[in-house]
Amino acid sequence: MGFTFTPIAKFLMILILPFLLFLLVLNLMSFDSSFYQKKFSEYGVQQNVPNAFSLHEKVMNFIGGKSNELPNEFNERERLHLLDVRNAVRISTLLLYALTAMFILLLIASALILKVNHYIINFVGKVLFFGGILTIALAAILFFLISFGFSSTFESFHRLLFEQGTYLFDPAKEMIVNLYPEQLFMDLGLRISKGVMLASASIILIGAVMALKSKSKKNKKIR
């Protein structure tokens, strides 16, 4: 059983790891107040929306589930879209928890089957190494798509998550596009892809060290 289960578990964990890293970095960076303060100043958001950061904090509290109220400055269409965003965030958080639990269960089950310490270390090292390589490749692709075709990438992302037409707004009449200009989302996307690449590089390094360590332990035992 161990000979069939552990390769399957390893494959699944390598596939799960990119989702874990992307979702974790996405959740951390999307709610970083200092990023929005910097970008609001950089793009002159306060000139178009005088109480911009106060509105933003209320939006983040709503999206993050800390509040059920939105400011009166938003119209019905904007409110519905922000509700859609809130639901998407909730689903992504549940997915993060579910994948984390699955990853841990696969790890525990594999460790119980492998039993020997250096086999377990080698197993985890390979999962981290190859999962990190897969993640960094996907993050690099995302970085390229955002850098050289952001508008189409942004549109595809919205089509994937939201009903068509519910995310298009008029800057002359609606607050949301003045509060969150497209360039801000481009910067956020680049920041997330860079964060994932950095996290992946660390994971790859840890995985390589673990795999080499287990190999040296195995060689010592053979001697």
Image (cartoon, rainbow, N blue to C red):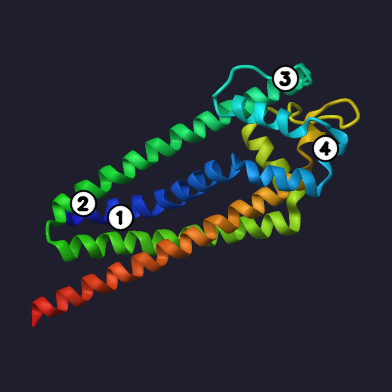
Res 1 seen here: no
Please state, as top left, top right, bottom left or bottom right, where the C terminus lies in the image: bottom left
Assign a secondary structure to mark 4: helix
Q: CA distance from mark 4 to mark 1?
A: 50 Å
First-in-chain label (4 vs 1): 1
Q: Nearer the viewer, mark 3 or mark 2?
A: 3
Query: Looking at the image, do the residues carrying marks 2 and 1 touch, with CB atoms under 8 Å apart?
Result: yes
Q: Nearer the viewer, residue 100 or 154?
A: 100
What is the number of the mark on residue 71? 3
Name the residue: 73% across, 34% down. Answer: 53
> Which residue has dot 4 on it?
46
- Sooner in the amino-acid sequence: mark 4 or mark 3: 4
Residue at label 2? 110
The disc labelled 4 sits on which kind of residue? Gln
| 165 relative position to 104: left or right | right
CA distance for labels 4 and 3: 16 Å
- Name the residue tied to disc 1: 10
SS for dot 3: loop
Report which quarter residue 159 is drawn in.
Answer: top right
